Each structure stands twice: as structure tokens, then as C-alpha cells.
Amino acid sequence: MKNSLLSQRDLAVLWHPCTQMHDHETQPLIPIKSGRGVWLEDFEGNHYLDAISSWWVNLFGHANPIINAALKAQLDNLEHVIFAGFTHEAAIELAEKLVAITPAGLSRCFYADNGSAAVEVALKMSFHFWQNRNQPRKNKFITLENSYHGETLGALAVGDVALYKKTYAPLLMNVITAPSPDCYFREDGESWADYSTRQFAHLERLLQENADEVCAIIVEPLVQCAGGMRMYDAIYLKLLREACDQYNVHLIADEIAVGFGRTGTLFACEQAGISPDFLCLSKGLTGGYLPLSAVLTTNDIYAAFYDDYSKMTAFLHSHSYTGNALACRAALATLGIFETQNVLANNQVLAATMKTLSQRFLNHPNVAEVRQTGMIVAIELVKNKRTREAYPWQERRGLQVYRYALSKGVLLRPLGNVIYFMPPYVITSEELALMFDVAWQAITT
Ligand code: PMP
């Protein structure tokens, strides 16, 4: 079957995510027949290097033999079972593993089925905790400028990317938004740590003024991904943890995008030596195979819900596919790869190669910044290097890069004017070189 025939059938009935469907009048849709490692193949034999891990989910390649085998075995026993009143081995083993590998103090695991749902769970649990602890005035959340936490209404409300949020503003709860520690805005010569520390003062002031009414602060540790892969120093998280303790406010770490090795450590919070009160995980959790998310939290929070039924303190939140057995099995296979294959050490080598390959972009006349945290590299395109004047969004520079890269067999999907690389960990140094070369050509030719 040809690409074009499938595209035609698709465009007759489907509505794709995060897409102005009208674009497909000129931009062909790409039907994928199969995937192997970092490569995707369409129906005409074209190959595409998945440089963005299919929206940041894939860790160990498409059609990974280890995950495939685990799923096939699980499939013959149990695909899914209601998770209220019932349980199963894969869900239990996965929760045990997550409790063991996440920062200290996180001892309870609540499952949901996508990242946004995990954020909703964390927000509701935090609010509900304070209700159960007789602090009903605590009903607000603090969030960071330019943050992103998902698309459902609660998650959207605590995010701050106007492109996704503005239209729905009348539907969203009010939040308190703190200036971001985003180091793109640091002064010339100022270190990331100094700038992030300086920016923390704003948040501290907001806490001083509002702590009585604040349930939690939600952050994306180290990298604001959907906000353009903007990065900040771990010192900010350390200061944040101290302040949350001091002001009696929960800390929600949304590691949906940055968890599982993306920033160099298994979890980004480790770089600050902190434990959040809630840790949201998804995406890489199943190696990019199946939708699953988990919210890890503390005994103290769990205890506030644990009582006689008549006290009505239970967390009555559910999703039909909670704890899906296949998804849990894929997650266990993924964690198994971390356990057996020196992944983080190998990633250090890959990250060093990415650093080397990204250096040539520094002198490009339309690049304002090249930044990196672990396995994430971002290149900020600007109209004017000296003033950092951005390209007008109407020019859709990112889309031009996307189109060019596709024609050369690389899937890049810039965020506005930011080209970024977040490849699966099974990529080779030759494939990394191809990825950076194509990006270079895309902005130079
Ligand atoms: N939080 C962060 C930090 C994310 O990057 C995303 C997805 N890009 C989400 C939450 C939402 O996850 P999902 O798309 O699975 O709902």
C-alpha cells in the first residue's frame, strides 16, 4: 500500500493531535509501516531517524526485542483487570521497583494512564490532603512561567504556554505564576546557578505572601520541555525543597518528560539531592510502548487518606485502565534494561558526543544559544543574534526545519524556533552525527 492512499483514508476520518489539519493540504502525512531501533519506515521504503523519541516516550528503540518478548508473555496470561478490589503481579512488582528507584521517602504508587492524568492526580491529592488535615484554605497552586504539565483542564491551568492555554483561559482555575528560573535570560557572564538562585527570590516572596492558601508548587525539574527546552540549575530545586518545607507547601515534581535518564541521572531531582512530595512519571516509563503513568508519594500523604470509610477521606479517583497489566509489563521490561545494561554510563558517552556535535551551531548567525542537560540538546534560533530578537512566529521557522529534515530522513519537530534533540538511548554516534548534520543543513541551506 502506498503512503498517499493511507494518507487519503486517514485525512477522511482522523483528527490528529496538536495539528492544524489544514496544514495537511500541503504537508503530507507520513504513514509508518514499521519501526526498528531509532528508525521508522514508511510504506514506500523511506526511513526516518526518530530524533525526538516519538514525543519523548521511546527510550530503547522501536520494536525492542526485550520489551516485545515481555509483552508477548504477559499477553498470554492477563491483558487487563479492574484495579479496584483486584490486583496483579506486574502492577505490584512495578510499584515495588518504582518505590525502590525513586528519591527517598516516596513509598506509595498511584497509577493513571497518561501524563496529564498523573498531573491531575497529584493536584487533587495535594488539595485533598490539606482538606483531610483541616486546612481548607489551602486551595491554590503555584506554577512557573513557561511551564507545561499537560492538556486536560487542571494540567493546562498549572501550565503557562500561551499557545496551548490562552484559548481555554475562561475554563481554567486561577493559579499563582512565578517568574521562571529559565537560564536563557541570564545576564552575560552570569552562571546558571547564579541566575536560578536570583530567580528563586521571586518564588520565595510569593510563598511568603500566599503560603496559607497554597497546596503545592508544581515544577518540571531542570528542563521546561514543551516551553522550548528551557533549562535551569539544580540549585533552584534545592532552594525550592527547603522553602516548601519551611512554608508547609507540597512540592510536585513533574518528571513525565525528564524522568528515566533524560537529564543524565535516572531522575532529575537527584541532581538537586531532593525528594518531592509527589513525583509524576509517564512517557519513558513503558519505554514508549503503552500509555501508563504513576504518581509516587509519601507515607505522610497516604496516611491522611487512610481511615474508616465513614470519615469520607478516601481518594475516590479512578481511570478504567488504571494499572493496565500490559503497560506495567512493558514498564518492568524497560526498568530491567536499566538494571542490566549500564544505560546511564552509556548515555554519558552519547551526551558527550552530542555536546561535541552541537558546538558548530554556536557560531551560526541565527543561533542565540545552544544548551544541554544530559541527553537533551536545544538550539535557539533567532532573527538577530546580537539582540536575540526572535523570528516572528508567523514565519514558522520550525516547520521549515521539520520539512527539510524529513526530506533527509530525520524526524525533528522543533518547538517554535527551538530545534532540539532527544533521541532514544540506542542511537549510535554515526546516527547522532547524521541528526546534527541534517539540522545544520536545515538552517544553513
Ligand atoms: N508534563 C510534562 C512535563 C510533559 O512534557 C507532558 C507531555 N508532553 C505532560 C505532562 C502530559 O503528558 P501526556 O501527553 O501523556 O498527557
Image (cartoon, rainbow, N blue to C red):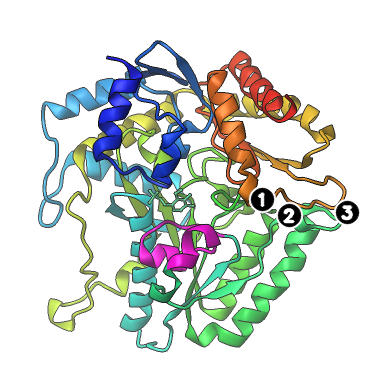
- Amino acid, disc 2: Cys
Residue 151 magenta: yes
Q: Secondary structure at mark 2?
A: helix
State the residue lying farthest toward the front: 25
Residue labelled with disc 2: 183
Q: Secondary structure at mark 3?
A: loop
Q: Position of residue 42 (x, y in %)?
A: 38, 18
State the residue lying farthest toward the top: 45
Q: Does any atom of ligand 1 lie closer than 8 Å to the CB of label 3?
A: no
Q: Are marks 1 and 2 in contact (CB under 8 Å)?
A: yes
Q: Position of residue 276 (x, y in %)?
A: 50, 61
- Amino acid, disc 1: Met
Locate residue 441 relative to residue 413 in the image: left or right. right
Q: Residues within 10 Å of mark 2 (few under 14, many from 20)?
A: many
Q: Position of residue 113 (x, y in %)?
A: 28, 49
CA–CA distance in space, label 3 to label 1: 16 Å
Residue labelled with disc 3: 188
CA–CA distance in space, label 2 to label 3: 11 Å
Asked if residue 97 shows in the view, the reply is yes
Q: Are marks 2 and 3 in contact (CB under 8 Å)?
A: no
Locate residue 30 relative to residue 441 in the image: left or right. left
Magenta residues, as a range?
147-167
Q: Are marks 3 and 1 in contact (CB under 8 Å)?
A: no
Residue labelled with disc 1: 231
- Mark identifier at residue 287: none
Q: Quadrant of residue 129?
A: bottom left
Residue at 50%, 63% in the rendered image: 159
- Amino acid, disc 3: Asp
Q: Earlier in the sequence, mark 2 or mark 3?
A: 2
Residue 330 magenta: no
Viewer-proximal residue, 378 or 400?
400
